[in-house]
């Protein structure tokens, strides 16, 4: 599609609530003329499956006076039809209702088909597969109330997606729910939000609401605020007996108090592409006062942004094995790749010899720390399986959700980080390569990966593929199962053994108990454990072609959650169909 003077930043500045990157909207598939219909078709693997389409449009051409691009989005069986009119540089998203069938066709057809009129376009699309949740959904009155409040008062919380309470693992940030059927929202925590200004009168005067606005020192109960009131403020959450009406009013206070502050901070932060100066990095880290880790790049420091967000600042050391090109590659990739199981990048510094990456802070460190013998707390079997699913989801997104696919090249337990809720996220994938060749192969001229996790085929041929990551993921699974590191060393350090050398003979003898992490003290589900062992064995086969795609691995891991014979698990099942995703988000 011809582009006349627009840029990705122009579109980003005008982007809507779906937050499609400007780089994505800047490109489009266009029909050859107004009489030609664009058709997108795919065949679901299950004819009873239900799907939802998200179609993103943006006009990047300056059209002749009096013309406007107008098109109809529809399905061939008329399950869905909607007309779209596009204005210059204003993104529009159309969401289809759920559709099903053995073959689903979405058509894009110009409504004005005269010669000289603009043809239909599609800038980006997403197709979501719907699966029924295992839980009863949140009471619809609560869902409607919070959805309306979120839209009306621009509550900018990325995690506020889908059902507010269900599954409980993915409940909206700051909400507390009761899980008596149906689940209800009973509390909203606004503590430590740096709120400013007077509390709305409707909130302050509620007789049944106990207001405790902790650590928000600039709030007061009346308008205008007095200095005394601003310093001695009160707290938030609501007691469990408070109805949803009161909770909704709490959310209203976010809109009143934070609306301008949020918009202002987003403009100044530009979270997805902010370029930090070295002086800012020094201030954020308090002159590099607290080291929280060290890796191939160099040291990692604890920091805090101006809005209070805690971050991890990774500095590229002069002695680092990685260099300028690798740093630039990581920064560029992380700016466009986003998934809940990938560590997010807030910004970067590239100033003279000072290069840094500013990541979200992961409060519970890396997975290897929690599996080590001397860690005081034990990861339960339930948490280990959920961590495996989280990591597989992140890797599946890199391999199958990004076009071209991204290969991590150094997946290991120290690169799987855990947040305060023990949700796992993959880190350091930015040093990977994006592969555009037919077989998704990159022939490396330099070593990649870490001993113990290296694909045997890569070590012999130098060819790295998605299956190399799958091998590494299999080793990670065995570490979750056994608690042992990939390279097992004797206490005096004189000898070492690869984890597979140790466990394969034991597994083949059928003695699974002898390989389970002794810290579990036998508290694990035997069927689930065997399932994970089988998955890990298939991932670590010596010949790459014999290994499964990570998408299949993920499906098997989720099955192990559902089929667990004791205890209870919850899972979310909204997935992107890997064959039809246009590119990374």
Image (cartoon, helix red, strand yellow):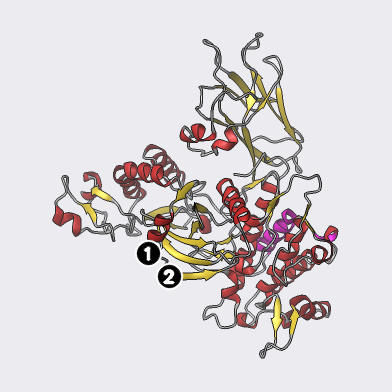
Q: From what the image shows, is residue 331 above or below residue 72?
A: below
* Residue 561 covered by magenta stretch: yes
Question: Looking at the picture, how far across and down is residue 521, in whole percent?
Answer: 62, 83
- Decide if residue 519 is in sight here: yes
Q: Label 1, secondary structure: give it.
A: loop
Q: From what the image shows, is residue 489 above or below residue 100?
A: below
Question: Looking at the picture, how far across and down is residue 344, in whole percent?
Answer: 53, 54
Residue plotted at (77% across, 68% down)? 534
Magenta residues?
A: 546-563
- Left or right for 347, reference 307: right
* Residue 559 covered by magenta stretch: yes
User: To which quarter of the image does residue 425 belong?
Assistant: bottom right
- Left or right for 363, reference 580: left
- State how far apart marks 2 and 1 are (Cα): 8 Å
User: To which quarter of the image does residue 562 belong?
Assistant: bottom right
Residue plotted at (56% across, 28% down)? 58
Tell me the number on the disc at residue 455: none
Residue carrying label 1: 286
Question: Looking at the picture, how far across and down is residue 526, in whole percent?
Answer: 70, 74
Q: Nearer the viewer, residue 184 or 362?
A: 362
| Cβ–Cβ under 8 Å for marks 2 and 1 | yes
Residue carrying label 2: 290
Quarter placement of the N terminus? top right
Q: Label 2, secondary structure: give it.
A: loop
User: To which quarter of the image does residue 194 belong?
Assistant: bottom left
Majority secondary structure of magenta residues: helix
Q: Alpha-carbon neighbours of circle 1 within 10 Å: few (<14), some, or many (≥20)?
A: some
Q: Alpha-carbon neighbours of circle 2 within 10 Å: few (<14), some, or many (≥20)?
A: few
Quarter placement of the C terminus? top right
Residue plotted at (49% across, 34% down)? 15
């Amino acid at each position: 599609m011809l582009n006349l003077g627009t840029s990705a930043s122009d579109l980003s500045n005008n982007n809507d609530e779906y937050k499609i990157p400007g780089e994505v909207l800047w490109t489009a598939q266009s029909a050859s003329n107004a009489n030609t219909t664009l058709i997108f078709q795919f065949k679901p693997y299950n004819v009873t499956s239900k799907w939802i389409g998200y179609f993103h449009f943006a006009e990047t051409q300056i059209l002749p006076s009096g013309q406007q691009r107008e098109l109809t989005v529809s399905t061939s069986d008329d399950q869905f039809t909607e007309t779209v009119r596009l204005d210059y540089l204003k993104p529009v998203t159309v969401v289809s209702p759920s559709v099903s069938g053995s073959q689903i066709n979405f058509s894009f057809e110009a409504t004005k088909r005269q010669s000289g009129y603009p043809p239909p376009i599609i800038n980006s699309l997403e197709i979501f597969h719907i699966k029924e949740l295992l839980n009863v959904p949140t009471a619809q009155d609560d869902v409607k109330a919070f959805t309306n409040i979120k839209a009306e008062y621009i509550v900018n919380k990325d995690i506020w997606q889908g059902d507010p309470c269900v599954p409980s693992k993915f409940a909206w940030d700051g909400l507390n729910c009761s899980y008596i059927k149906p689940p209800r929202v009973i509390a909203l925590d606004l503590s430590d939000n740096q709120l400013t200004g007077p509390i709305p009168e409707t909130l302050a005067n509620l007789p049944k609401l106990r207001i405790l606005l902790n650590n928000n020192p600039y709030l007061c109960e009346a308008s205008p605020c007095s200095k005394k009131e601003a310093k001695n403020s009160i707290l938030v959450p609501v007691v469990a007996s408070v109805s949803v009406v009161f909770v909704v009013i709490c959310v209203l206070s976010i809109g009143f108090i934070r609306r301008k502050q949020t918009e202002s901070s987003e403009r100044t932060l530009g979270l997805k592409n902010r370029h930090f100066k070295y002086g800012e990095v020094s201030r954020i880290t308090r002159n590099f006062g607290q080291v929280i880790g060290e890796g191939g790049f160099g040291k990692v420091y604890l920091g805090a942004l101006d809005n209070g967000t805690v971050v991890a600042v990774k500095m590229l050391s002069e002695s680092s094995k990685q260099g300028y090109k690798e740093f630039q590659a990581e920064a560029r990739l992380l700016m466009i790749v986003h998934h809940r199981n990938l560590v997010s990048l807030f910004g970067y510094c590239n100033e003279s010899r000072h290069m840094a990456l500013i990541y979200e802070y992961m409060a519970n460190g890396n997975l290897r720390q929690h599996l080590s013998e001397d860690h005081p707390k034990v990861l339960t079997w339930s948490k280990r399986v959920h961590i495996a699913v989280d990591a597989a989801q992140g890797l599946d997104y890199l391999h199958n959700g990004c076009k071209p696919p991204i290969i991590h090249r150094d997946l290991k337990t120290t690169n799987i980080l855990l947040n305060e809720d023990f949700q796992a996220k993959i880190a350091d994938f930015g040093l990977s390569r994006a592969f555009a060749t037919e077989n998704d192969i990159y022939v490396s001229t330099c070593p990649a990966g870490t001993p113990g996790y290296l694909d045997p085929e890569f070590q012999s041929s130098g060819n790295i593929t998605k299956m190399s990551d799958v091998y590494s993921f299999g080793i990670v699974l065995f570490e979750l199962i056994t608690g042992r590191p990939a390279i097992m060393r004797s206490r005096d350090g004189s000898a070492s053994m690869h984890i597979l050398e140790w466990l394969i003979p034991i597994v083949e003898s059928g003695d699974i108990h002898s390989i389970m992490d002794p810290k579990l003290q036998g508290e694990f589900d035997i069927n689930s454990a065997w399932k994970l062992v089988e998955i890990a064995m298939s991932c670590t086969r010596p010949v790459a072609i014999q290994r499964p795609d990570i998408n299949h691995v993920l499906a098997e891991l989720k099955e192990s959650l559902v089929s667990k014979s004791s205890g209870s698990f919850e899972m979310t099942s909204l997935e992107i169909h890997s064959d039809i995703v246009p590119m990374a988000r």
